[in-house]
Amino acid sequence: MMWDIELRKRFANGKRRFTLDVCLHSNAKRLVLFGPSGAGKSQTLMMIAGLGTADEGHVRLEGSTLFDHRAGIDIRPQQRGLGYVFQDYALFPHLTVLQNIAFALQPGLMNPKRHVHDPAVSRWIEAFRLEPVVHQYPDQLSGGQRQRVALARALVASPRALLLDEPFAALDRALRKHLREELAALQTQLDIPLILITHDDEDVDCFADAVIHIQDGRTVGETMDHDALATR
């Protein structure tokens, strides 16, 4: 099984109570979590990445256990081998493009040096055509450039899977279309599994080998293969 994920967590914020209870079982290389804002998609992705801890459940990727509450297994995020792209890209504002990408290869919390020479970093700078902006800072970049930097940072450590949290939401319509196609081609080339969360039908149409619907913290729809999407 590519994705074997069961997660349960109770959240409390003032008077608001929210229970996340999701089950994802799929062999899809491209799995889309689809649902409205506030459904619990981002919390699910963060717990898969190890950036949050579930009260119960497990996370297994291709038979490898990353989290199992009963067994007391909770592998640190840095050791899970997952590339993560946040919705707002979460680039470090005080680091250049080069340093942001190299940060994923840096042990500990030390910032990379301004002039990093690493073949993996150079590969992704070239792949995403970032050479002209390599010494610029995030606030000097366009939305598309920031997204490419975030993707390069996620891919530079050769992750076993890629987790994408609404990666096109902050972009205008024309740029979204272009970068969807670019990312889809890259995923096919790398043959890397991914989970993408979205509430945009066009993301589903472009990426989904399978879809799991999440609403109010729960999976409410069965996984569908790509051929079934046309009948939604």
Image (cartoon, rainbow, N blue to C red):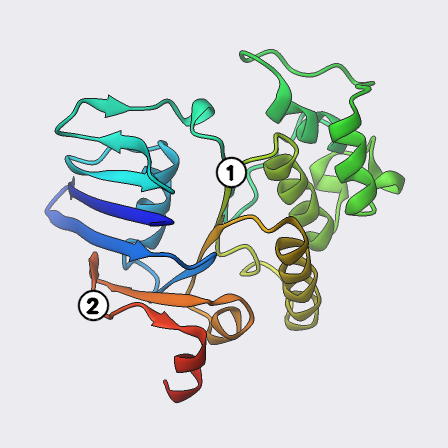
Looking at the image, which is closer to me, 219 or 114? Answer: 219
| Coordinates of residue 116 in the picture (x, y in percent) | 79, 19
Dot 1 crowding, Cα within 10 Å, few <14, some 14–19, many 20+: some
- Residue at 59%, 38% in the rendered image: 154
Residue at the image point whose x is 62% and y is 38% from the top: 155
- Counting labels gives 2
Residue 89 vs 207, above or below: the answer is above
Q: Quadrant of the C terminus?
A: bottom left
Amino acid type at circle 2 is Val
- The residue where tag 2 is placed is 220
- Above or below, 222 against 125 in this view is below
Numbered disc in front, either 1 or 2 = 1
The span from disc 1 to disc 2 (Cα, nearest Å) is 28 Å
Q: Which mark is residue 160?
A: 1
Of 218 and 226, which appears nearest the observer? 226
Residue at horizontal 14%, vertical 49%?
19
Residue at point 66% right, 33% down?
A: 156
